[in-house]
Image (cartoon, grey):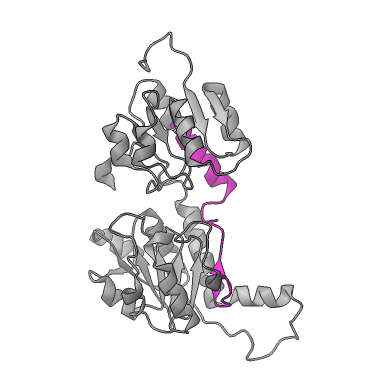
Amino acid sequence: MSAADPARVRLKVTVTRRLPEAVETRMAELFDLSLNHEDRKMTREQLVAAMQDSDVIVPTVTDRIDANMLAQAGERLKLVANYGAGVDHIDVQSARQRGILVSNTPGVVTEDTADMTMALILAVTRRIPEGLAEMQAGRWQGWAPTAHLGGRVGGRRLGILGMGRIGQAVARRANVFGMQVHYHNRRRLRTETERELQATYWESLDQMLARMDIISVNAPHTPSTFHLLNARRLKLLKPTAVVINTSRGEVIDENALTRMLRAGEIAGAGLDVFEHGHEINPRLRELPNVALLPHMGSATIEGRIEMGEKVLINIKTFADGHRPPDLVVPSML
């Protein structure tokens, strides 16, 4: 059925998780909308059934859509309009081979995620989780000159791994806090951008890691970035270094990181994402020098509504017979 056919019925759109009410209301006005009212992660079988019964499916980062599932989708599915910027959970290549388009929502969560990165930097370097735990447990005995001594962030060397939109937003914030900004990226930034961000480029990731006080992971998960911070590279870090990750958990070897934190070979970590989703290494949970968050980097009402608006535009543009503005193609990955 052509999207330009005036006699067509409204597109059947299935959303895998609940979205902000304003977004769902607008979707229901425009499309034949199916919602996951229980708001629980759908099983593979449920996702396949949804794809077979929909023109468009709107998944989130927790919905893994692989080649086998796409092979079962049938002829109806034409667009996977992802609610989120990252698409490593979707086999984009297989989708394109089957004539299924994939879109995402880039740029929306940049500022929110950069804010959370700075929050984690401050939380770990100033030992905020330890202070909170002490207060909540009623153990605080009063102020003392040597109690809860953290470190000053001003003057510290911040190494940003991945200098895209979010990495650059982190760099701008770090400059305000008086940090020295360094970065490693697949491609070096333009000279004027480096000058604006006061950022020093390192072609060698290994050399950068060995010299930084704080490492901020802001790289997407791709085959080339899986375990980019493996055991060998983590051992390059100074014992006083701190690791922050608000990007994708798979970029870090979580077991190796946990071992080194437990052994005191790394001073601390602030993690908003984990290698195995919500299944977090229990030994990691026990550590006092670690701040763990439940993937909150993009969790602002403003950001989530803007993400929904981008999804709406992508679907509506497709329904009108045009290329979605945020179309993802394999060469981009």
Work out which quarter of the rendered image holds the N terminus and state it.
Answer: top left
Depicted 79 relative to depicted 270: above or below = above
Depicted 44 relative to depicted 185: above or below = above
Q: Quadrant of residue 283?
A: bottom right
Q: Quadrant of residue 76?
A: top left
Instruction: Using the image as rendered, state which of residue 74 and residue 239 is in the foreground.
Output: 74
Instruction: Using the image as rendered, state which of residue 7 and residue 120 is in the foreground.
Output: 7
Depicted 31 relative to depicted 263: above or below = above
Q: Which stretch did the figure color magenta? A: 285-313
Q: Is residue 306 magenta?
A: yes
Q: Residue at x 49, y 77 (%)?
A: 268
Q: Is residue 15 magenta?
A: no
Instruction: Using the image as rendered, state which of residue 168 and residue 297 is in the foreground.
Output: 297
Q: Is residue 9 left or right of residue 137?
A: left
Q: Position of residue 68 (x, y in %)?
A: 36, 39
Q: Quadrant of residue 327?
A: top left
Q: Residue at x 33, y 62 (%)?
A: 196
Q: Position of residue 35 (x, y in %)?
A: 58, 32
